[in-house]
């Protein structure tokens, strides 16, 4: 791994988060035969094994997430983050900032997020050379993880997402047990099939558990990105596994969501996390990707 990629962090915010070592369970355990470097059966393996530190960490992250992600919690995070007054940075600066985040975590289990960003983007470019907006979507899709620099706990940044304010989908990981202490489970406004929503209201009208998908989507809208709707949808719902992989929540989707799901699934085939993957030459690739940033999300953004 190059020195640039492993650049050491002196960032104070990062120091405060050094135990965080963001591992995104959604990506760590991703099923994708085309790129898989190990048998597919080993991806997204959520069996409990307290002797395996990574599995145990994933389990704990989900238990904390499912305990704490309530309607009130998400409203609170939105109140904080959607002021967009945390920092100002270009897309490139934000990507480079993310690099620091993973730097001090276990090198055997993590690669810097910027490597994952370029790997995802380059795979997409290889398969879909003409869709430049899709390349850029691949590059930036995880940028919302910068929240981890500002005190956001891991369970409110990474991992699979789900809507709050209605019954939890059957396919959510650790569905049985992990929600036992979530107070929404005892709230009659939220604990029914539709909860606070209307039938087929559309994903746009759901309040999702707080994480990097929703945050980046909101940052892009706030900063008037011209990425097409397909790209924005991929960003907003790529971690919504209970929907696009688990088959839950169809009763809340509208026709547009059904169409968009194909794009989200297509995107997810490229969003693989594996340390054994080829490391792209990031310096050589920057000019191309900066031209895309200039086209779709130029300048300094408010985060
Ligand atoms: Fe992600
Ligand atoms: Fe990703």
Image (cartoon, rainbow, N blue to C red):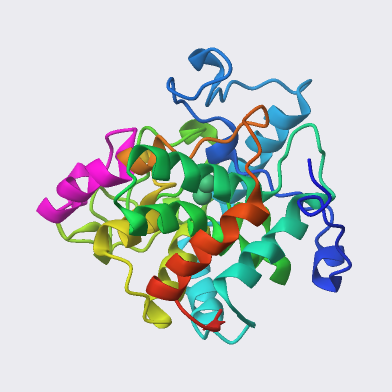
The quarter of the picture where residue 152 lies is: bottom right
Q: Position of residue 195 (x, y in %)?
A: 27, 57
- Residue under the image location 84 percent in, 70 percent down: 11
Can the viewer see residue 186 in this picture? Answer: no
**Figure check: 124 above or below 48:** below
Q: Is residue 62 above or below residue 256?
A: above
Seen at 16% across and 48% down, the residue is 259
- Residue 112, image x and y in percent? 71, 48
Q: Position of residue 39 (x, y in %)?
A: 54, 12
Left/right of residue 38 with respect to residue 34 in the rendered view: right
Between 256 and 270, the one lying in front of the other is 270
The picture places residue 7, in percent across and down from the top left corner, at: 83, 56
Q: Residue at x 68, y 28 (%)?
A: 55
Give the residues in magenta: 243-265
Is the C terminus in the top left, top right, bottom left or bottom right quadrant? bottom right
Count every numbered label the image shows and give the total.
0
Decide if residue 216 is on the left or right side of residue 171. right
Q: Residue furthest left?
A: 255
Q: Is residue 51 above or below residue 278?
A: above
Q: Is residue 269 magenta?
A: no
Taking the image as shown, residue 98 lies to the left or right of residue 39, namely right
Between 63 and 121, the residue placed more toward the observer is 121
The answer to whether residue 289 of the structure is visible from this angle is yes
Q: Residue at x 72, y 67 (%)?
A: 149
The overriding secondary structure of the stretch rendered in magenta is helix
Seen from the viewer's position, the closer of residues 172 and 142 is 142
Quadrant for the N terminus in the image: top right
């Amino acid at each position: 791994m190059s020195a640039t990629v492993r650049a050491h962090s002196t960032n104070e915010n990062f120091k405060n988060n050094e135990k965080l070592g963001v591992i995104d369970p959604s990506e760590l355990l991703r099923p994708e035969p085309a790129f898989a470097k190990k048998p597919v059966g080993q991806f997204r393996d959520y069996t409990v094994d307290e002797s395996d530190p990574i599995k145990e960490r994933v389990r704990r992250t989900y238990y904390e997430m499912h305990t704490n992600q309530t309607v009130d919690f998400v409203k609170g995070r939105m109140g904080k983050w959607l002021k967009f007054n945390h920092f100002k940075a270009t897309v490139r600066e934000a990507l480079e900032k993310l690099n620091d985040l993973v730097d001090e975590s276990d090198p055997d289990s993590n690669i810097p997020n910027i490597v994952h960003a370029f790997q995802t983007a380059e795979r997409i470019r290889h398969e879909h050379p003409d869709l430049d907006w899709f390349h850029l979507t691949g590059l930036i899709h995880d940028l919302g993880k910068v929240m981890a620099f500002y005190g956001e706990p891991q369970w409110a940044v990474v991992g699979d997402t789900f809507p709050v304010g209605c019954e939890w989908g059957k396919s959510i990981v650790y569905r049985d047990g992990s929600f036992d202490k979530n107070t929404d489970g005892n709230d009659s406004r939220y604990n029914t099939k539709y909860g606070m929503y209307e039938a087929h209201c559309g994903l746009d009208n759901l309040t999702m558990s707080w994480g990097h998908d929703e945050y980046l989507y909101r940052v892009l809208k706030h900063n008037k990105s011209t990425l097409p709707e397909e790209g924005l949808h991929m960003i907003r719902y790529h971690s919504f596994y209970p929907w696009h992989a688990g088959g839950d929540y169809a009763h809340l989707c509208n026709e547009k969501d059904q169409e968009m799901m194909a794009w989200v699934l297509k995107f997810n085939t490229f969003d693989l996390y594996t340390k054994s993957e080829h490391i792209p030459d990031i310096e050589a690739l920057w000019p191309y990707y900066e031209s895309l940033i200039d086209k779709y999300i130029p300048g300094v953004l408010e985060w």
